[in-house]
Amino acid sequence: MIDKNIIGKILNGQVQFNQFDKNYANLAKNRQNSLTKPKGSLGKLEKYAIWMAGWQKKERPTMNNFQCLVFVGNHGIAKRNVSAYPSEVTEQMVKNFKNGGAAVNQLCDLSNIALSVIPINLDKPTKDFSEERAMKLSETLSAMQLGYNSVPKKCDLLILGEMGISNTTSATAISCALFNTPVKKWTGLGTGISAKTLKNKISIIKKGLKLHGKKFDSVIEILSCYGGREMAAIAGSVIAARVRGIPILLDGFVSTASAATLTIFDKNFLEHCLISHLSSEPGHKGIILKLKKEPILDLNMKLGEASGGAVAALIIRAALVTHNKMATFTEAAVSKKI
């Protein structure tokens, strides 16, 4: 039975969450050093394999159950003309996902990833955060709980993505509040807006920050003020994965900003998360630097919908297949370095 109050209990410190297992990481490191290759010659692939071993608590991490969750939400801020597309596109894209026509569908098929698209109350957009809270605290908690409940029990790697017209505006507001950074510096073109719309987007975000402030001591509070339901759901999924010790690939700017809210609770909470790729949104690079993380890929992507996460999952598969299936020097009867 699912505990409906689990999010509150975790954020109040009443539930323990998983830690990286150094013993299994060391076993994986020793295996890497015994494989038929010069030490360190597979570069970051070795690092990713060891990281997966520490979180899965297996010397040879498994990759049978890669799961991608794409949460979808509509934003009240969309009516302020901060996007190149109308909010109706959100629901239209959900149909495209479910019909198998989106980029993430093709990439998940290629990467052997189970894909779940989860729309959240699309007929009821959040409020305009430049005028009032985007969501009530109860709405925020409900979306976080949905995200928590959406993480499957059997999962070797979780890829988190989103879809929601105008959600880069919310993500920028959250990022600037979290890290107290200039709005103009971290605001990007989103879906390809004009210079005029960008200026308006910056103005709207500044208005919201003036209304709600930048100082938050609660994850639920900051998501309630600026977030979308899909962003709260991502935060809930990140919590579930940390409790269960499931490693995560965060897709891009919006996913990273959503997860970053959890550093209010614990600055090291995102240790089980890798950044799949560097988005071309300027705020994403800023957040990554603040979190002291390094993206796996830099392909100038900015689509969202977990597309970057699905591509990065191929790199994780490459790391694990070499780690698990290469022969050791002893097995192959190959002489080691003198």
Image (spheres, rainbow, N blue to C red):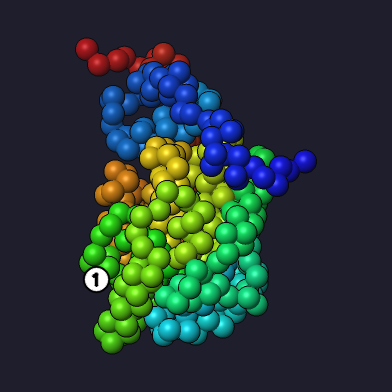
Towards the viewer: 156 or 127? 127
In the rendered image of this protein, does residue 57 appear above or below residue 227? above
- Please tell me in which quadrant of the rendered image residue 270 appears: top left
Q: Quadrant of residue 49?
A: top left
Residue 226 locus on image (x, y percent) = 45, 65
Q: Is residue 140 visible?
A: no
Residue that appears at 45% across and 58% down: 222
Q: Position of residue 113 (x, y in %)?
A: 58, 51
Instruction: Identify the element where label 1 is drawn.
Output: helix
Q: Amino acid at mark 1?
A: Lys
Q: Using the image as rendered, state which of residue 284 and residue 132 is in the foreground.
A: 132
Q: Residue at x 27, y 81 (%)?
A: 199
| x 36%, y 63%: residue | 213
Identify the residue under disc 1.
Answer: 184
In percent of width and height, residue 264 lies at: 41, 46
Q: Is residue 292 visible?
A: yes
In the rendered view, does 290 fall on the left or right side of 16? Answer: left
Please state, as top left, top right, bottom left or bottom right, where the C terminus lies in the image. Answer: top left
Q: Which residue occupies the foreground of this view, 213 or 255? A: 213
Give x and y (percent) for residue 298. 31, 56
**Quadrant of the snapshot with the N terminus:** top right
The residue sitting at the right extreme is: 1
Please say if 53 is above or below 331. below
